[in-house]
Image (tube, rainbow, N blue to C red):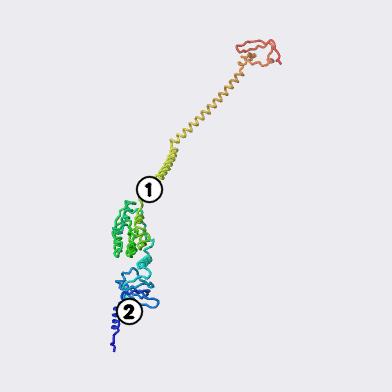
């Protein structure tokens, strides 16, 4: 007769059997996650794997769960590796998972997409939060590996384009498990140094090499940074989480250096152009003001007593000259008229007539005798000649000749 077993003994026996079964160690099981729970205190994952016909419970303890690059979700198809054992208390066999990979999608990419979606919903990528880069930064910090070729490229470009900039390098690991913490410390230190701009980045590499820049820690460190940040990770085709959070994403470290500072030769040309424009505008302004001052000076001069007196003197002089000309003209006209009258009077003078052989006869009353009828025989008359005269007696009167 078989011995009687307790439930505990039975479950323990089954557990020993399963543990001894090599085929149930390190197995790979493909299925869809359901009933996923992330225990907030312990960090253990509890879930169920299922396919179209069956299901099995699974657990992943914190020491394994913390190593995952992504966060499992319900409905996600995964491949779980682990051991099948019995949970003796409940008599339930389940998979004790030691690793998990997305089925058909890389774990790194899955983690990248999940974190990007999470941070985007929190607003870490919002354009309103991004800070404007200073147009003329004097102090620039670079967070990268001191031995990186990209570092020297950035220093050379900044020094050539904008030699007045002061560059400070903050050393950090740029790949590996310890890189996120190292980069976060360097960013925090740089943010406390009163810089105008920070460049965070490294040269190209594999997706795994660059994956540290997909760290949530780095994303939040950049988001909290008060200094504007330019991300410059890998090549143009490489996009990491820091690129979405930073204030400006540069396709390469060299491009970041060019975007960070202006070209001093271009600035010199611009300043020269502005100087010429300013000189032209100022010269035009001075000419305009001087012309205006000249007009005001002329106006003031025209209103001064001396100017009014000079103007009136000029008018008086002109009037006087005009009056003199008019008077001279009038006098000349009168003199000419008088001369004409003198000539006419001279022509009509009796003396002028007598010079031609004529004479004047006066009666006893000294009246000029004009007609023979005014005389009588025996009248005494006085005859006046051109030179001298004579007295005569009328002895005979002759009638007027026809």
Q: Which residue is mark 1?
A: 269
> SS for tag 2?
strand
In terms of depth relative to the viewer, which is nearer, 111 or 344?
Answer: 111
Q: Residue furthest bottom?
A: 1
* Residue at position x 59%, y 20% in the image: 343
In terms of depth relative to the viewer, which is nearer, 396 or 29?
Answer: 29
Other residues around mark 2 within 10 Å, as few (<14) / some (14–19) / many (≥20) = some
In which quadrant is the C terminus drawn? top right
Q: Looking at the image, is 81 positioned above or below residue 143?
A: below
Tell me if 372 is positioned left or right of 295 in this view: right
Q: Nearer the viewer, mark 2 or mark 1?
A: 2
Task: Tell me where residue 85 sits by quadrant.
Answer: bottom left
Q: Looking at the image, is 332 positioned above or below residue 305?
A: above
Task: Tell me where residue 67 sits by quadrant.
Answer: bottom left
Q: Residue 219: tell me if it is visible.
A: no
Query: Mark 2 touching mark 1, by CB under 8 A?
Result: no
Q: Residue furthest front?
A: 23
Question: Which label sits on residue 128?
Answer: none
Q: Which residue is mark 2?
A: 93
Q: Position of residue 291 (x, y in %)?
A: 43, 41
């Amino acid at each position: 007769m078989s011995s009687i077993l307790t439930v505990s003994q039975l479950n323990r026996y089954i557990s020993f059997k399963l543990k001894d079964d090599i085929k149930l160690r390190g197995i790979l099981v493909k299925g869809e996650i359901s009933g996923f729970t992330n225990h907030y205190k312990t960090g253990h994952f509890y879930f169920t794997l299922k396919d179209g016909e069956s299901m099995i419970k699974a657990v992943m303890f914190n020491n394994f769960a913390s190593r995952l690059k992504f966060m499992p979700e319900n409905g996600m198809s995964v491949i779980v590796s682990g051991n099948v054992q019995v949970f003796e208390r409940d008599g339930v066999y389940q998979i004790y998972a030691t690793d998990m990979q997305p089925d058909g999608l890389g774990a790194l990419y899955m983690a990248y997409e999940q974190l990007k979606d999470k941070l985007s919903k929190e607003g870490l990528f919002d354009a309103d939060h991004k800070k404007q880069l200073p147009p003329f930064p004097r102090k620039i910090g670079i967070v990268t590996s001191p031995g990186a070729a990209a570092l020297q490229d950035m220093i050379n470009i900044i020094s050539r384009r904008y030699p007045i900039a002061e560059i400070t390098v903050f050393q950090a690991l740029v790949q590996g498990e310890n890189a996120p913490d190292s980069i976060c410390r360097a960013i925090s230190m740089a943010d406390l140094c009163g810089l105008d701009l920070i460049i965070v980045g490294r040269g190209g590499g594999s997706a795994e090499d660059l994956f540290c820049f997909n760290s949530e820690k780095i994303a939040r460190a950049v988001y909290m940074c008060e200094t504007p940040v330019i991300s410059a990770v890998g090549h143009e085709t490489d996009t990491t989480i820091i690129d979405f959070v930073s204030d400006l994403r540069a396709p390469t470290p060299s491009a970041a250096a060019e975007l960070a500072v202006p070209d001093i030769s271009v600035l010199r040309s611009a300043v020269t152009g502005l100087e010429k424009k300013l000189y032209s505008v100022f010269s035009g302004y001075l000419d305009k003001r001087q012309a205006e001052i000249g007009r005001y000076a002329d106006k003031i001069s025209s209103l001064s007593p001396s100017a009014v007196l000079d103007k009136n003197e000029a008018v008086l002089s002109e009037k006087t000259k005009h009056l003199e000309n008019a008077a001279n003209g009038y006098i000349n006209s009168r003199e000419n008229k008088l001369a004409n009258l003198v000539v006419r009077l001279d022509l009509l003078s009796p003396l002028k007539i007598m010079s031609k052989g004529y004479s004047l006869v006066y009666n006893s009353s000294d009246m000029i005798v004009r007609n023979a009828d005014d005389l009588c025989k025996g009248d005494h008359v006085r005859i006046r000649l051109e030179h001298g005269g004579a007295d005569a007696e009328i002895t005979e009167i002759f009638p007027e000749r026809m």
